[in-house]
Amino acid sequence: MQRPMPDFAEALERHLRDAAAEIASPALVAAPVPSARPRPRWRVGRGFAAAGSLAFVAVVVAIVLIASGSGTKTAPAFGEPLVLRTPLVPLPKVARPGSSAAQILGPESATITRGHEIPTSAGPAYLYGNAAGQCLTVPDPASPEPAVERGVTCLPAAELGRFGITLVLGTDDESFYVAAIPQGVRAPVLRTESGETRTLEPSGAGVVTVKATEPSVVTRFDRDGATREDALAQPPGYPVVPAPPPSGNASG
């Protein structure tokens, strides 16, 4: 186990030794003075002062150890998307879990009737799930009945906190994209065939929505700089929009 703040610890040890020596020192005991009463209050006061110093140091040590995790190092955890902190609302029947959700959420998915609402231009999307994972259901803007015709994607809980969860709907000529982004990661970047590159700033709930009418790619990031790419409005076999020159970040 690595000692937290070695310089501070050494200085602290010296302070403790000096304080202990001060308590035990004969100089703290007043020598008798002829024709005068001993002054026990002076000795007691000094003792209390030294003891108080030791108590203060002990408190400082405790605070340092707690703050430093007792010298251990833990890997940073990825934060769940902020949308999971929004209030739960009743799910419309057309948006409730089906057989595809059960593959990730398990048989208990049939009991899920509430989720987190995500406003979009095509109507409300919903994020729902349990300890096993989360599912994102989004209305299809290309459908005459987007509230009924919906897409759904599900993700295990272990993956949700790294890159978030996304869904792409639409045709080869136009795509509608919704993503719930984890906390503490770089904002996604959109690249289009025409050469546009822009950052997609998540909403206050950590959500990104995009409508693409030309071949595009959205790059998402985790905290370590690894990436995931989502293709938008790209017909089958279309060459993926070229990525910018590598910046040294790992791609996964």
Image: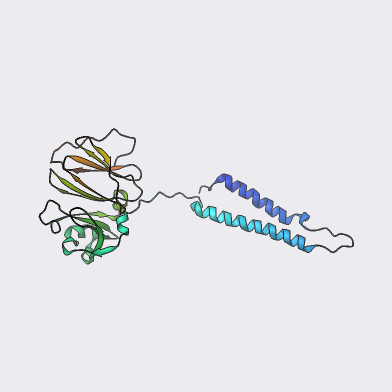
Q: Classify residue 204 as left or right of residue 43.
A: left
Name the image quarter holding residue 247: top left
Colour scheme of the rendered structure: rainbow
Q: Farthest residue toward the front? A: 121
Identified at 30% across, 46% down, the residue is 201
Q: Is residue 171 left or right of residue 186?
A: left
Please tell me which residue is depicted at 71% across the width and 53% down the height of the picture: 21
Q: Position of residue 141 (x, y in %)?
A: 15, 52
Please count the marks in the image: 0
Picture quarter with the C terminus: top left
Q: Please identify the quarter of the rendering in which residue 249 is found.
A: top left
Name which quarter of the figure residue 37 lies in: bottom right
Q: Residue at x 17, y 54 (%)?
A: 122
Point 17% across, 36% down: residue:
239
Q: Position of residue 159 (x, y in %)?
A: 29, 51
Q: Is residue 37 above or below residue 221?
A: below
- Give the x, y percent position of residue 50: 69, 57
Of all residues, the one furthest to the left in this rendering is 144
Left or right placement of residue 49 versus residue 217 in this view: right
Query: In this view, which residue lies farthest toward the bottom?
Result: 111
Q: Residue furthest top?
A: 245
Viewer-side residue, 25 vs 124: 124
